[in-house]
Image (spheres, rainbow, N blue to C red):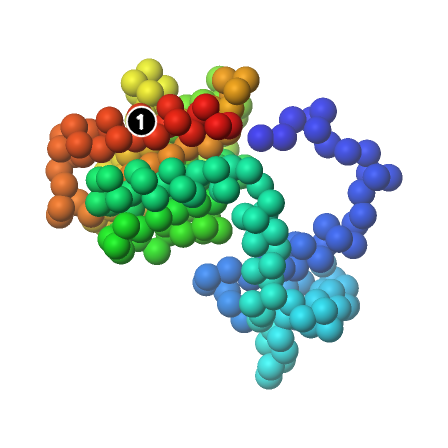
């Protein structure tokens, strides 16, 4: 997470680029097509400014325009691919994820913390379609996922306290932990035992177990998990069967980071 010391001076910022990216980010799974007025409302821009950004992005190929509604084009994927192709973490993690996933016959993924969300940067299904969230580029709440909870457990206590103060957990499933005291206890449990186990808090039927990944300086930079369908594996069996495989790959990947 950024600190105040990381914030650049205003004179060094290109406001147009920042606002253009905000326009792209205004589109999501629930809002795939937006009008100029809706983009303006979601970004805080005036309608005139939102129109100019949308027209520019359409000209550049990042948007399409039909019946007064705008939507993203596949060209936007180039932005994410640039990260996946250039960043060390996905390139190093992917082959080890293959080994991990196929060794246990379950899906595996690596994620990083981006503000209060978990972003998947590498994933292998091993033939098991467990969840649509287990693919590179997907974003989910950090507090109700094993990778996210493990990364929250690695934060300095002041940053964790700030997170718990601002987060508003919602009841996604009947198993979702929404009480902040209970959530803090689960994060503390993950920190003390070295792994996080989340049972159907993000999706019914989805159980995940995660361990932290550290670089050569001992800093936690990501988390790696195994995901199973609840009908295939009970919690105690998941710890017994999957944790040793996770730890083995954790040690190997830590040596590369």
Residue drawn at x 86%, y 39% is 11
Residue drawn at x 44%, y 25% is 254
Using the rendered view, name the quadrant where residue 153 is placed: top left
Which quadrant would the N terminus be assigned to in this image?
top right
Query: In the image, is 159 to the left or to the right of 46?
Result: left
Residue lying farthest to the bottom in this orientation: 67
Using the rendered view, name the quadrant where residue 144 is placed: top left
Residue 219: x and y in percent read 51, 21
Residue lying farthest to the right in this orientation: 11
Q: Which residue is mark 1?
A: 248
Residue drawn at x 30%, y 30% is 246
* Residue 55 to residue 147: above or below: below
Residue 146: x and y in percent read 34, 35
Residue drawn at x 28%, y 50% is 126
- Res 44 seen here: no
- Res 115 seen here: yes
Within 10 Å of the Cα at label 1, are there few (<14), some (14-19), or many (20+) other Cα atoms? few
Residue 135: x and y in percent read 40, 52
């Amino acid at each position: 997470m950024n600190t105040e010391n990381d914030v650049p001076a205003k004179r060094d910022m290109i406001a147009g680029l920042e606002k253009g990216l905000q326009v792209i980010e205004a589109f999501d799974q629930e809002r795939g097509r937006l009008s100029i007025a809706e983009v303006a409302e979601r970004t805080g821009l005036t309608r005139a400014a939102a129109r100019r950004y949308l027209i520019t992005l359409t000209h550049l190929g990042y948007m399409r325009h039909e019946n007064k509604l705008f939507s993203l084009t596949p060209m936007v994927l180039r932005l994410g691919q640039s990260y996946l192709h250039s960043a060390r973490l996905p390139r190093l993690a992917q082959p080890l994820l293959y080994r991990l996933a196929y060794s246990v016959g379950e899906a595996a993924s690596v994620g990083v913390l981006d503000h209060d969300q978990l972003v998947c940067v590498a994933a292998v299904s091993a033939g098991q379609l467990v969840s649509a969230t287990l693919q590179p580029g997907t974003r989910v709440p950090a507090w109700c996922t094993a990778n996210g909870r493990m990364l929250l457990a690695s934060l300095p206590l002041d940053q964790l306290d700030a997170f718990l103060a601002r987060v508003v957990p919602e009841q996604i499933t009947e198993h979702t932990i929404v009480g902040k005291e209970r959530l803090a206890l689960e994060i503390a449990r993950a920190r003390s035992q070295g792994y996080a186990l989340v049972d159907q808090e993000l999706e019914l039927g989805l159980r995940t177990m995660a361990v932290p990944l550290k670089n050569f300086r001992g800093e936690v930079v990501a988390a790696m998990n195994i995901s199973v369908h609840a009908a295939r594996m009970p919690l105690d069996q998941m710890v017994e069967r999957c944790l040793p495989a996770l730890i083995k790959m954790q040690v190997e990947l830590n040596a590369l980071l």
